[in-house]
Amino acid sequence: MLFLSRSGTRWVIVAISFLTILYIITNHSSNISNFDANDLFNQVSDYRIQYNNKLIAESENTETSSNHEPLTWPQLLKALTFDKTLFKNIGEDISKENMDFFREVYSKRITEPKFSKLTYNEFKDNNGNVKVLSKDEYPRANATLLTLVRNQELQDIVYTLRQLEAHWNHKFHYPYTFINDEPFTQEFKDTIKRHTVSDCYFEVIPPDMWNKPANIDENIETEKINKLKEKGVQYIDKVSYHNMCRFNSGYFYKMERLQQFRYYWRFEPATDYYCNIDYDLFKFMEDNNKTYGFTISLYDNPLTVETLWPVTLEFLEKNPQYAHPNGAFRWLTENVQHPDYNQITGGYSTCHFWSNFEIGDMDFYRGEAYSAWMDALDEAGGFYYERWGDAPVHSVGLGLFEDRSKIHWFRDIGYHHSPYKNIPNSDKCSAPEDSGYFAPEDVHDQNCLSNWIRLEMTNKELQDY
Ligand SMILES: Nc1nc2c(ncn2[C@@H]2O[C@H](COP(=O)(O)OP(=O)(O)OP(=O)(O)O)[C@@H](O)[C@H]2O)c(=O)[nH]1
Ligand SMILES: *[C@@H]1O[C@H](CO)[C@@H](O)[C@H](O)[C@H]1NC(C)=O
Ligand SMILES: *[C@@H]1O[C@H](CO)[C@@H](O)[C@H](O)[C@H]1NC(C)=O
Ligand SMILES: [Mg+2]
């Protein structure tokens, strides 16, 4: 009796799934979108946005490469020399000007990108009822949520995971991958599994991907680290911090478990996600050929990356073919807001995508250009002699070796990692009235998102929300 009714139920479920999937395939237009065609950016055409038009137009005139021929080393060197006249119309205080521009952009009400086919896990059946595909039915992209985390950070990672589930992943059930340099405790695993129905992988990092490599000379290391310590560089004498930065720069995507995935969404303990996102972010990446997505862009302490740029230029001189002709060269080399930083680094602005939230295509890192460059970085030893962070390393790699149009600013993902925030002006977010808030005032000069928008995005990209 019981057996019969169970298998009967199962048959009905199979039939419904089959019909639902058939319906999706034959009737793609039934996707429900919250997109409101009236809510367009061009209603908010203020002077600063027009100003951006003008700047973009000027910068495009001076650009070396609207064609996509590979650059020779001299051409590349020229492209990596910032043209200050791009900012000639900006007043004396560029930090303030950039903050004003930032607030102006954030004042625009947004919902979600409107230039893409967005994929929702919501479908209407023939009776007009909304259906949601289950974990087993929904065809996910090749992707995982990913975090490097310690056992003692369990409460903080659960705090963030609950927000990820509530705002996004309960609709899609993407798997989670937790990585650690030590085995996770049973308590850690059990607790995590109580907060999601998604698959969870718990992985231990092989020691050779985590520990200091043999080429690091400990005498040089001690000397250099002591100097930076005197200058007050944060975390400089914590070896595990250096291990973490190197691992996140060049190794995580080589872990055995991650071979089965292409896209990752990195999240960190104790970070906040403020907005409901209804569309599948990984499919957004795939469908729009995006390699990398970020929310916040900042300068770094230049002392942590003193030789990153010179080592990179040396690499590029030998391998100019790896540079993408449409790279984000201006953002990497901008020297107006903090010219003192460029002096210390030999030409790198230190501007980077803040990597504690990022969505990326690991096949980019696995590719020839990034891999060869990573070998050069490891050889130079700056992960230990300085404190090269994974954020500047990802950013310099992307800015040089990828087409800048494949880098996406996720302005709709409300995010917070102390002390910085991305708060869109959207009904989908908590506290939209705080949109345009960035951080306490004394660190406003650390914001370089406006430079990304002005120097690397087209006006169309800015308006496509
Ligand atoms: N397993 C493990 N994870 C680590 C270790 N060090 C850092 N992490 C993780 O790596 C990520 C970055 O480390 P954080 O200490 O947050 O570094 P940060 O974001 O630069 O610094 P804060 O501003 O203090 O957050 C976090 O997800 C940490 O949990 C470590 O030694 N072992
Ligand atoms: C997912 O992506 C990885 C990396 O590109 C690839 O090796 C793997 O075969 C892909 N898996 C599927 C099911 O497509
Ligand atoms: C993505 O790239 C593929 C292959 O290069 C191309 O056919 C497609 O049109 C691109 N799609 C978008 C949205 O740019
Ligand atoms: Mg952190």
Image: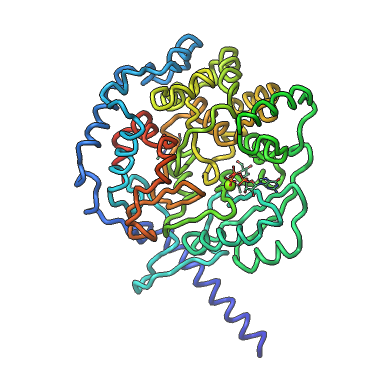
- In what quadrant of the picture does the N terminus appear? bottom right
Number of marks in picture: 0
Taking depth in this image into account, of 412 and 71 the one nearest to the observer is 412
Residue 262 x %, y %? 58, 43
Q: Residue at x 70, y 42 (%)?
A: 255
Taking depth in this image into account, of 363 and 76 the one nearest to the observer is 76
Residue 181 x %, y %? 74, 47
Residue 159 x %, y %? 57, 61
Q: Is residue 85 visible?
A: yes
Residue 235 is left or right of residue 277, and the answer is right
Taking depth in this image into account, of 121 and 296 the one nearest to the observer is 296
Residue 330 x %, y %? 41, 24
On the rendering, which quadrant does ligand 3 occupy?
Answer: top left
- Residue lying at the far front in this picture: please name it: 230
Q: Residue at x 36, y 28 (%)?
A: 455
Indicate the quadrant where residue 248 lies.
Answer: top right
Above/below status of 59 relative to 6:
above
Indicate the quadrant where residue 122 lies.
Answer: bottom left
Taking depth in this image into account, of 278 and 164 the one nearest to the observer is 164
Q: Is residue 138 visible?
A: no
Residue 116 is left or right of residue 346, and the answer is left
Q: Residue at x 55, y 71 (%)?
A: 14
